[in-house]
Amino acid sequence: MRFEQAREVLEHAEQFHREVGAFYRRLNAGTNNARLSLLLDYLSGREARLADGLEHYLESTGDGVLDTWLQYTHDTDALPACPEAHLAGDATVDDVMALARQFHGCLRNLYSDITNSAEPPDVRAVFNSLLEEGEREWKKYARNVQMLVDL
């Protein structure tokens, strides 16, 4: 079992978004594929917005919710280190989409686990809200990528 304060979990999620965004920017710097470059630019901006949203939430939320201790079942880090993500130099739009799906799944699983196990209703509501917002963002991402692919 793992124990962390809600603040720490949200700080890890913010850092995860920043690392993923940086990863997409590095990939973008190494591609000559115009569609892939558009996708990577979109994804890096999306990750920056998500990280900024969490940062704002952390700054504006009272300590009561953020100081709550959480127990969840991840025995290892719930959010993998982004440098472990590997894509070949000739990565395709589909490859990047699959990787984005994996990153999204990491956060979805973490937020879902906490939503299902957190005791205080206000903390559960915070993580449920993040889970729902993540799903809305994912649907928006999928629509936007489909429009890009159809270009």
Image (spheres, helix red, strand yellow):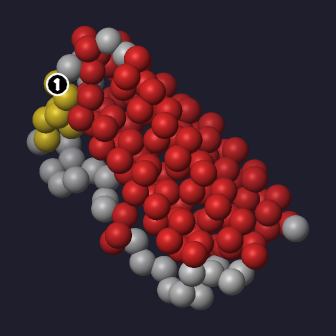
In this view of the protein, can residue 120 be seen by the observer? no
**Front position in the image: 63 or 4:** 63
How many badges with numbers are in the image?
A: 1
Where is 65 relative to 75, above or below?
A: above
| Quarter of the figure with residue 55 | top left
Where is 143 relative to 37, above or below?
A: above
Q: Residue at x 57, y 81 (%)?
A: 30
User: Left or right: where does residue 25 sit relative to residue 139?
Assistant: left
Label 1 secondary element: strand
**Front position in the image: 26 or 120:** 26
Q: Residue furthest front?
A: 29
Q: Residue at x 62, y 81 (%)?
A: 31
Q: Residue at x 56, y 41 (%)?
A: 49
| Quarter of the figure with residue 76 | bottom left
Q: Position of residue 145 (x, y in %)?
A: 73, 59
Q: Amino acid at mark 1?
A: Trp
Q: Residue furthest right?
A: 151
Where is 74 relative to 5, above or below?
A: below
Q: Position of residue 110 (x, y in %)?
A: 34, 42
Q: Position of residue 17 (x, y in %)?
A: 44, 49
User: Left or right: where does residue 131 sit relative to residue 45?
Assistant: left
Quadrant containing the C terminus in the rendered view: bottom right
**Front position in the image: 71 or 116:** 71
Q: Residue at x 48, y 80 (%)?
A: 87
Where is 85 relative to 79, above or below?
A: below
* Residue at image mark 1: 69
In this view of the protein, can residue 89 be seen by the observer? yes
Instruction: Classify 10 Å Cα crowding around label 1: few (below 14), some (14-19), many (20 and above).
Output: some
